[in-house]
Amino acid sequence: MARILFGVPNSSLAHIWLLVSAYVRQRHPPGNGFGWPAELSMVKGNRKRESHAGEVGPPAMKYRAVNSHREEDETTVGELALNDASGLEPKGGPGADVATLKTRNHPLVIGTWSVRTLYQAGKLDNLIQEADALRVDITGVAETRWTDEGLIRGDNYTMMYSGGTAHEHGMGILIKNDISKSLMGYWPVNERIILCKFEAKPFNIVIMQVYAPTSDYSDEEIEAFYDDVSKTLKQAKSSDVVIVMGDFNAKVGNTAMSKSIGRYGLGTSNERGERMIQFCEQHDMSVINTHFKQPKRRLYTWKSPGDLTRNQIDYLAINSRLKNAVSKCKTYPGADIGSDHAPIIIKINIKLKIPQRKSTKAAKYDVSQLKNEELQKKYAVGVKNRFECLMLENCTHEANEENVNNIWDSLKTAVTETNESMLPEAKRERKQAWMKEEILELMKERKKYKGTEKYKELDRQVRKECIEAKEDWLNYNCYLIEELSKDNNPRQMYEEIKKFTSYKIKARGHIKNEKGEILMETEQIIKRWSEYVEQLFDDYRGENPIQSFLQGPCILASEVAEALKHMKSGKACGIDGINTEMLKALGILVLRSSPIFVIVCTAQPTSRRILKHQCLYFCQRNQRQKTARTIER
């Protein structure tokens, strides 16, 4: 021991501590009664580490990888900074585990799964149940067999999907709603590729789910697929964490002489596997599920009918410089969705940013309460009293622009404050799904008998009950709609139709700029639309003389009352948060209570600030018309 300590001249206290720690662990492993706390084990990923940053001439001490199941690449402390240009600084000892990618105690869990189909009753609910059981934050899904593109928002998960015109292939990415705020944008490229981008710390994450053509397709189609993936990767920045995952229908094995492939792949490579290795080398990526030592049961991702053959054809590839950020990778063959593929799950030490955006949406109140005559009178009096107080504080009797705006602000404030005190907030009605808890429990029971004859019996029962439950749900809703139609209640009828037809939101999630580059982030999309509208209306048509002294008769209070009477109820409110029911409840009581009413009615409309606000709504184009003459959606 003395020879070890004194054999290192001029060593820092940190270096001596590392040497002593290594010696004691070698002679006295944790838990053997020596008194060494198990929390400080070098094998554990949460061990305490001393930083070598800023020291002169750190010793070239070699360590094994932190994860005992990881491929044992020897790494020197001086090599722990994975990329000097990235601005990373090593903050610890063995392997560094990319310490700049924070939240080791709360890793991000990402998975990929080829499910064969989601175009079957109950499959999406089955997928969500399995993702919840595996505690996966982001799940890439191959072979959804859905058409078109868009997203589905559920109670706990959001599904973004990309498909073609036929029910084949199809991609999807399932994310938990608690991390959906980190989603910067998504790009449904085609029926074989979908890309999502998340805001994270210290680097953003770009996740691409792919589904490569099988061996039945020609080499030209394989090349076209990898060309599409390479073009899509250009959307990522050099500093982004890029993950390409999915069903590659290729075997890379464990014998390839490539830095992109580890020593723990399954089997030997084939021709399609060589093409995938070439792609990874071209983009400096590592196939992460070949770098972790696991039993073969935790390596295979596909099995043939009858379980005669098991292969590894699904992969997750990540930037080579960031592969040490992954702390765990293995397959879960016990997961059940009726597929011949098993999901691959990784844990990556990175922290998603959850932006705290202030909501600009006005609160929604239950205006149906205003049908009560007693409450309606109290509401009108409350707004009137509050409005008059604000008028005395902020307004005058002059008909100028500033005063008119102050009058409007006072009325808006009076209505808003009265709403908060008198009206309850509208409760969002939860969409009643047809899926039953009994069916979900039956799916869990089926999972226990995977690979047996009992499984087939339970699978038939699950399918039958899913079809019957969905059929009963549709029949009930159709009956309800028919009854509402007979009762001449079109508004409620269309509300019921919307409940079970609008669960899929058709949205492309991106647009293109003038150069043809893809824009996914919200700020970029808003900026591009602003530029487009400015260019569209930026033309000189000459000046027409404006007669500024034209003035018609004053608007009468009776005319305003008649207009309020004929306004339709049930319409969405504007940016002021005031809807028709509130104005009808007020009647003419507030506006004709003072001479201010005359000022508001006779003032120039252009002087009212509220009339200068603009809101553009862009309708979803037909699937066949993805491009327009002036802008590409």
Image (cartoon, helix red, strand yellow):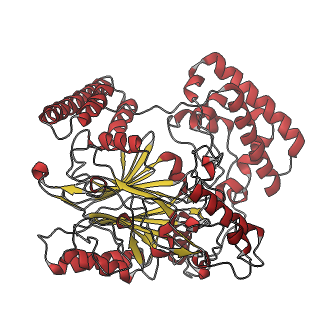
22 vs 33: above or below: below
Q: Nearer the viewer, residue 52 or 405?
A: 52
Residue at the limit of the structure toward the top, as seen here: 374
In the rendered image, residue 179, in percent from the top left (x then y), is placed at 52, 51
Picture quarter with the C terminus: bottom left
Q: Nearer the viewer, residue 202 or 23?
A: 23
For residue 175, side relative to residue 576 (left or right): left
Picture quarter with the N terminus: bottom right
For residue 604, side relative to residue 126 (left or right): right
75 vs 67: above or below: below
For residue 214, side relative to residue 316 (left or right): left
Asked whether residue 265 appears in the rendered view, the answer is yes
In the rendered image, residue 57, in percent from the top left (x then y), is placed at 70, 82
Residue that appears at 62% across and 62% down: 23
Task: Please tell me in which quadrant of the rendered image residue 485 appears.
Answer: top left
474 vs 66: above or below: above
In the rendered image, residue 21, in percent from the top left (x then y), is placed at 65, 60
Q: Nearer the viewer, residue 141 or 403?
A: 141
Asked whether residue 632 appears in the rendered view, the answer is no
Task: Please tell me in which quadrant of the rendered image residue 271 appears.
Answer: bottom left
Residue that appears at 41% across and 41% down: 132
In the rendered image, residue 40, in percent from the top left (x then y), is placed at 63, 53
Q: Nearer the viewer, residue 631 or 264?
A: 264
